[in-house]
Image: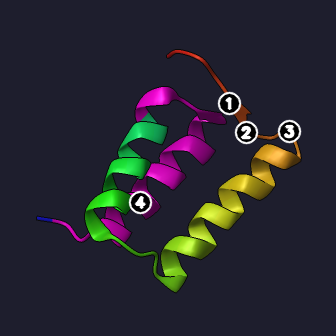
Amino acid sequence: MESTNVIIRQLVSEALHLRRLTPRIEDQINCALTQQGHISDVEYEALELLMEEMDSGRVQLVASC
């Protein structure tokens, strides 16, 4: 099974590609973080990039797919 930091980076990449943070992506990120119990530097950087893109309006938080 893939490590959670790879999964989180893939999910962040998907959100950046779609320019949307969907409930499914958000739930999967939260699940991976919960399973891991901590956040690595790589995960933090990926999530920080996602938040920066959302703050700038390039990625939208959507209520449904």
Q: Earlier in the sequence, mark 1 or mark 4?
A: 4
**Label 4, label 3: how many angstroms apart (C-alpha)?**
21 Å
Query: Would you say the magenta stretch is mainly helix, strand or loop?
Result: helix
Where residue 51 appears, as percent x and y from the top left, is 72, 54
Q: Which mark is residue 8?
A: 4
Residue depicted at 24% across the width and 71% down the height: 3
Give the residue furthest to the top.
64
Where residue 12 appears, as percent x and y from the top left, is 52, 53
Q: Earlier in the sequence, mark 4 or mark 2?
A: 4
**Label 2, label 3: how many angstroms apart (C-alpha)?**
5 Å
Q: Which mark is residue 59?
A: 2
Give the residue furthest to the bottom.
41
Q: Which residue is mark 3?
A: 57
Please, what is the three-letter code of the amino acid marked with disc 1?
A: Leu
Please, what is the three-letter code of the amino acid marked with disc 4?
A: Ile
Q: Which residue is mark 1?
A: 61
Q: Is residue 20 above or below residue 44?
A: above
Please, what is the three-letter code of the amino acid marked with disc 2?
A: Val
The answer to which image quadrant residue 2 occupies is bottom left
The answer to which image quadrant residue 1 occupies is bottom left
Q: Nearer the viewer, mark 2 or mark 1?
A: 1
**Label 4, label 2: how many angstroms apart (C-alpha)?**
16 Å
34 vs 45, left or right, is: left
Residue depicted at 85% across the width and 47% down the height: 55
Contact between labelled residues 1 and 2, with CB atoms less than 8 Å apart: yes
Q: Which region of the structure is painted magenta?
A: 2-24
